[in-house]
Amino acid sequence: MKITGNKAVHALLVILQLSFSAAIIFSGPLFPSSLVLIAVSFGALIFALWAMTEMKFRFSIFPVPAEGAELVTTGPFAVVRHPMYTSLLAWTLCLVLGEPKDFRFALWILLFAVLLIKSVAEEKILSARFSEYSEYRKSTKRIIPYVI
């Protein structure tokens, strides 16, 4: 069964994700000045790379899994269902905290909202494609471990 969802909505979500991320990245220094924030940023990068490795580098920025994709529930996916979103949010939050300004916090909140909406769209497709997805959802949080 081929499940694609609404391609226009998916494209809009990706455009918004990239726009808000870029606005955060380019509205301040590329590296926070605090060693703690640099360490958290590095941890976010490692977490994202770990997720990509678990997926065998078969992923898309669009919320639709590739044909023939398998459900991955190991590694960082055992901690959260969307570890690459978690990584992006952690990294961009470090950038915002490194040079805090109201508009940068607003951009981060908008990015969080877009990724939350995008994850809901993706999970509808994953639930339809993988019968075991509903059970997996019960054991892991969506984006933030132990929270949401």
Image (spheres, helix red, strand yellow):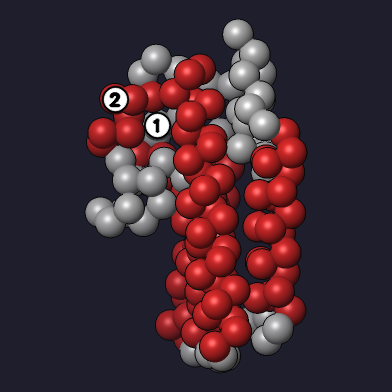
Q: Nearer the viewer, residue 12 or 49?
A: 12
| Percent of width and height locating residue 19 | 72, 64
The type of residue carrying mark 1 is: Thr
- Please give the residue where the numbered disc 1 appears in the rendered image: 73
Asked which quadrant contains residue 32, the reply is bottom right
Disc 1 versus disc 2: distance between alpha carbons?
11 Å
Residue under the image location 60 percent in, 8 percent down: 1
The type of residue carrying mark 2 is: Glu
Asked which quadrant contains residue 2, the reply is top right
Q: Is residue 68 above or below residue 75?
A: above
For mark 1, give the secondary structure.
Answer: loop
Q: Which label belongs to residue 135?
A: 2
Q: Earlier in the sequence, mark 1 or mark 2?
A: 1
Q: Is residue 57 visible?
A: no
**Tags 1 and 2 in contact by the CB under 8 Å rule?**
no
Q: Is residue 34 visible?
A: yes
Task: Name the residue at the top extreme.
Answer: 1
